Amino acid sequence: MTLIRFRSKALLALLFGVLPACSAATAASVPPAPPPIAPASEADIEFLTGMIHHHAQALVMAGWAASHGASESIQVLSERIIVSQRDEIGLIELWLGDRGVEPPALAEMVPTATAGGMVHDHEALMPGMLTPEEMAGLDAARAVDFDRLFLTYMIQHHQGALDMVDTLFATDGGGVDDTTYKFASDTFADQGSEIDRMQRMLAALTASQQ
């Protein structure tokens, strides 16, 4: 009987020694909860929501290149704009959704963007965006005339995006969020670089027509 009690105690000790270790191992395998998402500033929300509207018009403009007889270089540039700005819209939509903000529906904006009707503060076109007359003129142009107008207007459009970044960083609480700061900084660098490229393309096109 003494031997049996000893073995029982040893078994219980073994069990109680193993179970906490198993529990600790199980707890260690559970990934930690993600940190809470910081609330967004109104400046960041307005900037990123506005960028979806801004990009919508650029997508329409770039989408015309293939059907309007644009040169190969313009079509390559346009495709790059379409890919990059669609990706950026997707990132913005995720950022807004994570913060409980309903992003504007891109499909609903395209007809308005085609008409040049995207507004800022419900009164004026957002920085750099084309008026209805300018959009109609670009849509009517073909071949080299399209190339010239496209470069002229897309430079204007990109410059508007840079102005939006400047406004964001000049606004109290704007660009404090890490994602917004990176997006705005990348926009300034990437679109600034594309402006330089398009200016060179426009200068070469103008020289070839003289």
Image: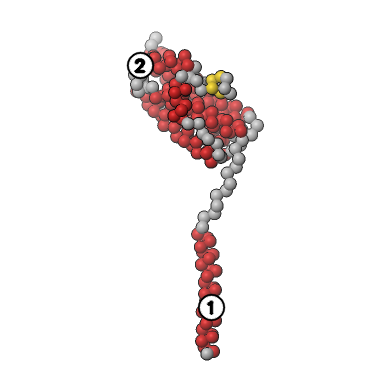
* Mark carried by residue 12: 1
92 over 75 or under it: above or below: below
- For the point 47% across and 22% down, which residue is it? 112
Point out residue 119 in the picture as x, y percentages from the top left corner: 54, 22
- Crowding around mark 2 (Cα neighbors within 10 Å: few <14, some 14 to 19, many 20+) is few
Q: Which residue is mark 2?
A: 143
Distance between the Cα atoms at labels 2 and 1?
87 Å
- Residue 71 visible in the shown view: no
Q: Is residue 77 left or right of residue 175?
A: left
- Residue 207 visible in the shown view: yes
Q: Is residue 208 left or right of residue 168?
A: left
Residue type of the residue flagged with mark 2: Ala
- For the point 48% across and 19% down, which residue is it? 116
Point out residue 5 in the picture as x, y percentages from the top left corner: 54, 85
The mark that comes first in sequence, 2 or 1, is 1
- Give the number of marks: 2
Task: Name which quarter of the figure residue 170 lies in.
Answer: top right
- For the point 52% across and 90% down, which residue is it? 1
Please state which of residues 79 and 40 is positioned toward the viewer in this rendering.
40
22 over 140 or under it: above or below: below
Kindly give the residue lying farthest to the right in the view shown.
Answer: 172
